[in-house]
Amino acid sequence: MSDAMDVTVAVFDEMDIAQIRIAARDMANQLGFSSAKAYRVATAVSELANNLHGHALPGGTIRVTRVNRADQIGIEVVSQDSGPGIPDIALAMRDGYSTNRGLGGGLPGTRRLMDDFSIESQAGVGTRIVARIWRP
């Protein structure tokens, strides 16, 4: 981890998931996000970290950073791994689809929680997800 506005955690277990979730929530609070938006950030980060822990063995990293756009302050979340990749992104983004006995709500839920969302994945290379949320 570095300073409070740029935090990176390697996600290998539940403690790492909790650490990055708390850091994301704290950053949102420090930047003046509403309680509801801080909760959205923490939930999205938790979902992405859980995906790293459950699908991208041996794990990956989550980076949470303050970003600026024109006159807005935001938070950018980058999830990166070198796991097996996602063979069908469109299918993975459908509610209820899971390859790991989950509920299949993590990626589509994260997309709904955040203002901006993009995903790139290549089989055998890994996955990179970038999500942003903006303070009004």
Image (cartoon, grey):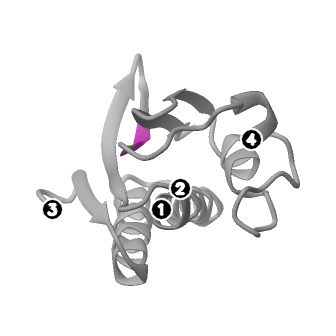
Q: Which of 9/72 is in front? A: 9
Q: Secondary structure at mark 3?
A: loop
**Residue 49 marker:** 1
Q: Quadrant of residue 93?
A: top right
Q: Nearer the viewer, residue 42 or 81?
A: 81
Q: Identify which amino acid the numbered label 4 is placed on.
A: Ala
119 in relation to 70, above or below: below
Secondary structure of the residue carrying tag 2 is helix
> Which span of residues is magenta-colored?
74-80
Q: Amino acid at mark 3?
A: Met
Q: Which residue is mark 4?
A: 92
| The residue positioned farthest toward the right in the image shown | 96
Residue under circle 2? 48
Q: Is residue 67 on the magenta stretch?
A: no
- Residue corresponding to mark 3: 1
Who's the residue at 44% across and 66% down the image?
A: 25
Q: Residue farthest to the front?
A: 124
- Give the numbered dot on residue 26: none
Q: Amino acid at mark 2?
A: Leu
The first of marks 4 and 1 along the sequence is 1
Q: Point out residue 14 in the picture as x, y percentages from the top left corner.
A: 43, 81
From the viewer's perspective, is the residue at label 4 or at label 1 nearer? 4
- Evaluate if marks 1 and 2 touch, with contact meaning CB atoms under 8 Å apart: yes
Q: Quadrant of the N terminus?
A: bottom left
Q: Main secondary structure of the magenta part?
A: strand
| Residue 105: x %, y % from top left | 78, 57
